[in-house]
Amino acid sequence: MHKKSTDRRNYPAEWDLLNRELKAIEQFDTNLLNVVERLREHQLDTGFIRDDLYAVQYFDFPHPDHPERFLSVQYNPARVNRLKIDVNALPPERNDVVNEGCFLCSGNIEWQHRGIEMGYTIDLNGMPFTVLMNAYPLMPAHIVVVTEEHIPQAWDLGDAGMRQFRIDEVVANLATMAQRLPGYVGFYNGDGAGTSVPAHFHYQFFMRRNGGDRFPLELAPVHQVADLVAEVVEYPVSAMRWSGDNRQEVIARAAAWINDWLQVNLETRPNLSANIFAMADDSGELLQVYFVPRDKQLGHSPRMSGMIGSLEILGELVLTTAREKRDLDWGKIDYRSIARILSYVNVPL
Ligand SMILES: [Zn+2]
């Protein structure tokens, strides 16, 4: 069906051909579910997706007093390879390298991956973004949605003198995208809150395990504080949730609350960052947005090798090292120890 060509001369033509095919699928479906499935198939076929979770093991640990709640671990040994750049991938000409070789910049994608990485260009609230597959997925169908422009991941604090998203734009784009991928989990890892590419703005989306498993954060009890607005309680990190079937209203309420909260806390917490989530249910009707405040100085927990990003905040630690696997096998990890790891990065609301 599709060629496995890595011939550089064909790259723009192949990108264009793939984009036309995906556009036709999107127009027929009106959402992006089959587009992502087709892109994933294409990227598995070219060999860009290196790991398709075959080696991943999952462990769920129930809450000692409330067995319906749990925290989990995925042991994902392939993740340690994710930031290795292939030594054979050198740019054909020095001036082909843009923005210090940033691997989310379209100008670098072709030479870095020798023509096998391709994406799909979409419009998100009037701005061009590119959908790329994650080479080392954390979940089935794990995508990265990146701005075409090389702009930073951190939101605008009004002092940057360069193009950056305001927090309300970060929320609006994420929630809009979530409704185009019903059933998926979408998230934004703020600067120092799990992102490995702070220089280039991006969101991530993935399909849930077993076609629809909900995460511990989504199963945590909430205290309703106003119409649409709830505070997550009895969870290792602080979180707010907005939910409803009117997208504009959910986005507006969440963005306004977060903006106010940031203004109030900016002086005392100059290193504020966040993990922000958006998910629409399978029908695409019910939209939920979560905000978890973070501090850039608290990106790691002393008891875990990797950064604490959105998947960890959702309640699933990603462990990658042999030593962590031994701790798992020896029963040194349980609900309470995972909760301790997460609570280390907690920023109170
Ligand atoms: Zn870039």
Image (cartoon, grey):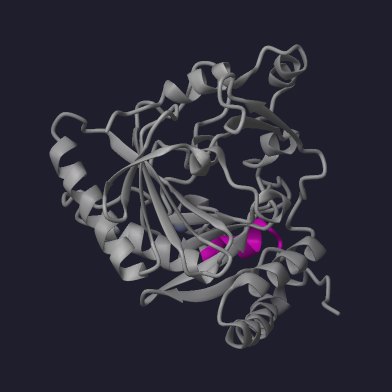
Question: How many callouts does the rendering have?
Answer: 0
Above or below, comparing residue 297 to residue 255 in the picture: above
Q: Identify the residue shown where x is 77% and y is 17%.
A: 329
Q: Identify the residue shown where x is 39% and y is 40%.
A: 222
User: In the figure, residue 298 lies in which quadrant?
Assistant: top left
Q: Is residue 1 visible?
A: yes
Would you say residue 112 sits in the magenta stretch?
yes
Quarter of the image with the N terminus is bottom right
Would you say residue 331 sits in the magenta stretch?
no
Quarter of the image with the C terminus is top left
Which segment did they paint magenta? Answer: 106-114
The answer to whether residue 348 is left or right of residue 10 is left
Question: Residue 287: x and y, percent?
Answer: 43, 62
Question: Residue 156: x and y, percent?
Answer: 24, 52
Front-most of residues 247 and 143: 247
Q: Name, please, the residue furthest toward the right.
A: 1
Q: Is residue 196 visible?
A: no
The answer to whether residue 155 is left or right of residue 184 is left
Front-most of residues 103 and 28: 28
Question: Residue 21: x and y, percent?
Answer: 68, 84
User: In the figure, residue 66 lies in which quadrant?
Assistant: top right
The answer to whether residue 172 is left or right of residue 308 is left
Question: Residue 47: x and y, percent?
Answer: 79, 59
- By secondary structure, the bulk of the magenta-drawn segment is best described as helix
User: In the figure, residue 92 lies in which quadrant?
Assistant: bottom right
Above or below, comparing residue 76 to residue 256 in the picture: above
Q: Identify the residue shown where x is 65% and y is 80%.
A: 22
